[in-house]
Image (cartoon, grey):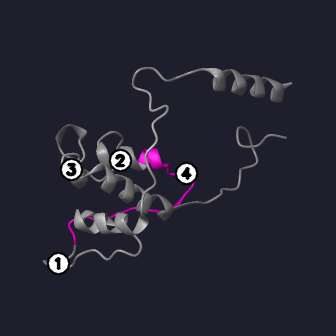
Amino acid sequence: MNKLLIIALFLSLSACDFGGPKSARGFVLPEGDVALGKETFVDLQCHSCHKVAGVPQPQEGGPPQFSIKLGGQNTRVTTYGQLLASIINPSHRLAQGYPATLVADAGVSKMRNYNSVMTVEELVNLVTFLQPKYRVISTRPIGYYPNYLP
């Protein structure tokens, strides 16, 4: 009975259109190029603050002020859309416990706004380069509710 209720709820929610005027529904970007994305990552000096496997951080003048790791293992999928939002609106969602050195007054990210500097093609290539750097790891469910269903 419980499984039927869950299925019915899922079907009813999937039929709803949560779109509205600010919905991203139907928004699709063209395919990007990983090599050009890596080039953009370096050209825009993203590697000055962000650490990504396969891209050394510049060392002139000493070590970087911050070194924010991008990519790696995660228990959730890091989606293309989340990466896009993080680049074009870096203050949209700062992780809890974000180091104070990376946040300006009023909870705004210190990441520079690249929207007037970066082309759409560079953005697409950059996200295409970054997205495969994230790997989802599975976690073992613990043996009690809500993570355990008989």
Which residue was labeled with disc 1? 62
Of callouts 4 and 3, which one flags the residue occurring earlier in the amino acid sequence? 4
> Pointer 2: residues within 10 angstroms few (<14), some, or many (20+)?
some
Quote the CA–CA distance across marks 4 and 3: 25 Å
Viewer-closest of 124 and 130: 124
Residue bearing mark 3: 110
Camera-side residue: 9 or 34?
34
Q: Amino acid at mark 1?
A: Gly
Mark identifier at residue 77: 4
Residue 15 sits in quarter: top right
Indicate the position of residue 62 as horizontal and vertical percent values: 17, 78
Q: Amino acid at mark 4?
A: Val
* Label 3–label 1 contact, CB within 8 A: no
**Proximity of marks 4 and 3: CB atoms separated by less than 8 Å:** no
Q: Residue farthest to the front?
A: 30
Range of magenta residues: 64-82
Position of the N terminus by quadrant: top right
Q: Residue at x 66, y 56 (%)?
A: 139
**Secondary element type, mark 4:** loop
**Secondary structure of residue under mark 1:** loop
| Distance CA(mark 3)–CA(mark 1) | 20 Å
| Position above or below: 131 against 43 | above
First in sequence, mark 1 or 2: give its number: 1
Please rate how many residues cluster around mark 4, counting C-alpha atoms within 10 Å: few if below 14, some from 14 to 19, many from 20.
Answer: few
Q: Which residue is mark 2?
A: 86
Question: Residue 126, position in %: x, y?
Answer: 36, 58
Q: Pick whichever of labels 3 and 2 is earlier in the sequence.
A: 2
